[in-house]
Image (cartoon, rainbow, N blue to C red):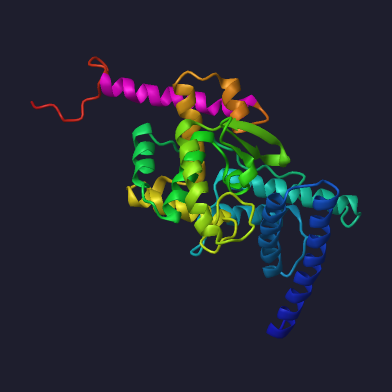
Amino acid sequence: MSAVAERAGRTAVEGRFEVLLLDFLAYLEFERGLSRNTLAAYRTDLLQYGGFLAARATGPVEARGADVADFLADLARGAEDRPPCGAATLNRKTACLRSFYRHLRRAELIEADPTANLKPPRKGRTLPKVLAYGEVKRLLDSVNGSSAADQRDRAILEVLYGCGLRASETIGLETTSVDLRRGFVRAHGKGSKERIVPLGREASAAVRRYLRSGRIDLAAGSDERALFLNQRGGGLTRQGLYKVIQGRARAVGLGDRMSPHTLRHSFATHLLAGGCDLRSVQEMLGHADVATTQIYTHLSAERIKDVYFDAHPRARIKRTAAVS
């Protein structure tokens, strides 16, 4: 096959795949009501799969189980321009492909499902990264300036650690979501489920200070409803939130360990270590299943064990070699 014919064939395959992809995404949005974030993730995963198939001059309708398995194996190996995918990511992409092919079968576009016999890698149990309280305090105390950005960033950090919100929930807060008099925030979590989370003394003080001064300066007269604003007066984006967290963390030597979720994990772990019951933590985190919350009990136990081995005279690990 000539190079021109090969390019033409690949273009045709990609064009057909785009039609199938748009139809599938429309089904997920209008019939299953999936969130915008989930739709974006499915789109990204399937575009990656479509590109892999196009390089083989085949499409999703013609693909066989070996093609799907090769795609996942390629992701697991990684390449020069991308790191290897972990088990959790491979499981997610496998679930996406299975859903896509179930849709194609319902539409009677394929007879056999190439994902039927797939066996994705087992998802290993990994513990989330958590900061010690001293590290959290160092981070929070470092943001003490009077500029609008300082006031906003301090309020963001206090809310993330004080309420355990997700990144999407934090940027989704509006000025009416915060009740400073009664001390709570109204967050909208996964599936648009609303929950009420207590707002502690330090977080309330930081938000109040930001609303009275910093936010007014950032808004510059706009009628933006988002609580946390960017320098142009619009609502802070997810990317903007990550940039704030990582920039502030880097300034105190925590940059390689930090994301909004790090403070959420720290919130849950520190609550349990302080004696809060599991069900209450589950409610505050917005977990549908308490089993999701239970990982923090294991994390707390690991933390206690570390403290024990460092502190107890009969358990302390020797850090220097014995002298003969």
* Total numbered badges shown on the rendered structure: 0
* In front of the other: 244 or 120: 244
Q: How far across and down, in percent of the image, does residue 268 sit? A: 51, 30
Look at the image and tell me whether residue 146 can be seen.
Answer: yes
With 71 as the anchor, is 300 left or right in this view?
A: left
Look at the image and tell me whether residue 127 can be seen.
Answer: no
Residue visible at 50% across and 48% down? 212
Q: Residue furthest right?
A: 108
Residue 299 lies within the magenta run: yes
Kindly indicate the quadrant of the structure image that contains residue 194. top right
**Quadrant including the N terminus:** bottom right
Residue visible at 85% across and 54% down? 104
Residue visible at 49% across and 32% down? 267
Q: Residue furthest top?
A: 314
* In front of the other: 75 or 286: 286
Q: Is residue 3 above or below residue 210?
A: below
Q: Residue furthest left?
A: 324
Q: How far across and down, in percent of the image, does residue 132 sit? A: 37, 33
* In front of the other: 55 or 31: 31
Residue visible at 54% across and 47% down? 86
Q: How far across and down, in percent of the image, does residue 311 sit? A: 26, 20
Q: Is residue 16 above or below residue 24?
A: below
Main SS of the magenta part reads: helix
With 278 as the anchor, is 63 left or right in this view?
A: right
- Tell me the magenta residue range: 290-311
**Quadrant including the C terminus:** top left
Q: How far across and down, in percent of the image, does residue 155 sit? A: 48, 44
Residue 84 lies within the magenta run: no
